[in-house]
Image (cartoon, coloured by chain):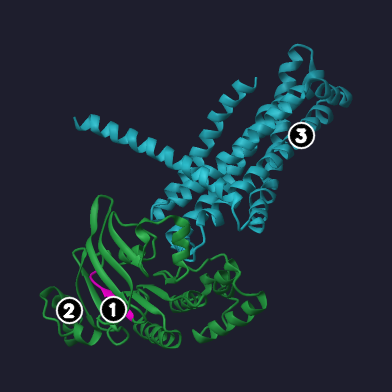
Amino acid sequence: MGTPIIIQLKGVEKSLGGQPVLRGVDLAIPKGYITTIIGPSGEGKSVLLKHIIGLMRPDRGQVLVDGVNIAQIHDRELNEVRKKFSMLFQSAALFDSMDVFENVAFPLREKRLVSESDVQRYVPEMLERVGLGKMGHKFPAELSGGMKKRAGLARALVMGPEIILFDEPTTGLDPLMAHAIHDLILAMHKTFGFTGIMVSHEIPKIFPISDWVAMLKNGKIIAMERSEEFLRLSDPLVREFISVPHALAAT
Amino acid sequence: MYFIQGIGARVVAQIEEMGAMLLFLLRSFGWLFQPPFRLFQIIKQMHFVGFKSTFVVILTALFTGMVLALQGYYSLRKFGSEGLLGSAVALSMIRELGPVLASLMVTARAGSAMTAEIGIMRITEQIDALETMAINSLQYLITPKMVASLISVPLLVALFDVVGIGGGYIVGVKLLGISGGSYWSSIESAVEWKDVYGGILKSISFGIIISWVCCYKGYFTKMSAEGLGKATTESVVLASVLILVWDYFLTSVLM
């Protein structure tokens, strides 16, 4: 590809409850771009994402983050590697005992990287960027799905991570809101320049915001291409998956 | 053949779960001695487990003491030794009923809430979110709860004992007409340090059992609403049964 690789998976296999989910995944994530992993529901896309950040460990294979194999390191070292990461969860995973401000401030306060006066300055700034300027005092239960995602994104961005993982960032949102969240991710990517890894089945909406697209099918990555070239692939499994929404749109 | 395999699989699964529970306990306490120390979290949990349980503990203790005095008076009168009512109430309270009943009340009130809270955090990926922020979820969530209940339960038990003895006084002295002097003096002469010490030891171990079982069940909740309901029920039942079983063995050792 010519671009530096930040994360590499080699032959990752994982079974859950006796069922093989990942059957030898090989994947290289280029640094500084947004790579989207697509595939049908239940194919193990989220499982794959959890392997990248060490929430799950593979039965076999390697997960290399900047050359460090996180599949076989001690929890303490894993926590060092995780400082490069943030993750936006499917449910946003905001702490429901805290309001939005405290949620976004949480990683900063926990890691004591900045003074409290800086927290008071950074957090409103970050909330403003994601369009939640006046929402700091609200609790997660009072927010709509789209607002939760925005707050989750603010919390993911606040530590200035090198890599952000997005687990189906638009699932459960109406099309307008999904579009807005995609635009927000793209805008934040332009501002902060992180490496984004997204898992989604939002065809074709993800193509304009992704630099690279990979497809997971039958527990393996069957194709990875630049976003604009992915649509021209002739692989029947890829064609079947990406053409369904077009067919639906046509009817 | 399948039958025998089935039995074997269940036994192995049970032993595995027991091992997992023990590791969970050791790890959670191990994190207590590593920075960052979460004093604020411990105080917050003590407020929840301890302070917020005081009302229900006082209420239970009062009526337990009162009914003990009634029953004790009925039995002791047959032998003409109503004067010993104070010691009968105090000994049963301090040695047995205080630790067991207070712990069962804490299990029902705070233990079930612990399982539900941790279980919801598991289902809604909040525990995963902590981990991705390089924060150890055991240290952040579980250790403070264990320490808090280790400290709070003995204090609640002490409160239970005092209120229960007071309840016995109300019924025995004020309602049934025993002399107040003999009520207190029989307590003073009958209760020894080893009774009190045994009660404290029991309540400390019950405090560990409650937080251990309830946190474990919440932390490893199956990812569904049904799983969470099941985990909450299981945690209350298992903690209550363990308290009673452990109580028997501890009593027989402390005798």
Q: Residue at x 42, y 69 (%)?
A: A91
Query: Residue under circle 2?
Result: A244
Chain letter corresponding to the colour cyan? B
Q: Amino acid at mark 3?
A: Gly
Chain letter corresponding to the colour green? A
Q: Within 10 Å of the Cα at label 2, are there few (<14), some (14-19), or many (20+) other Cα atoms?
A: few
Q: Is residue A166 left or right of residue A136?
A: left
Query: Residue under circle 3?
Result: B167
Q: Amino acid at mark 2?
A: Val
Q: Which chain's residue wears label 1? A: A
Q: Residue A160: within the magenta?
A: no
Answer yes or no: are tags 1 and 2 on the same subunit: yes
Q: Residue at x 40, y 56 (%)?
A: A73
| Residue at mark 1 to residue at mark 2: CA–CA distance | 11 Å
Query: Residue under circle 1?
Result: A202
Q: Within 10 Å of the Cα at label 3, are there few (<14), some (14-19), or many (20+) other Cα atoms?
A: many
Main secondary structure along the magenta-highlighted residues:
strand
Q: Amino acid at mark 1?
A: Glu
Q: Within 10 Å of the Cα at label 1, are there few (<14), some (14-19), or many (20+) other Cα atoms?
A: some
Q: Residue at x 18, y 82 (%)?
A: A248
Q: Which chain's residue wears label 2? A: A
Rendered view: B97 above or below B253: below
Q: Which chain's residue wears label 3? A: B
Range covered by the magenta-colored residues = A34-40
Q: Residue at x 11, y 76 (%)?
A: A235
Q: Position of residue B118 (x, y in %)?
A: 50, 55
Rendered view: A21 above or below B253: below
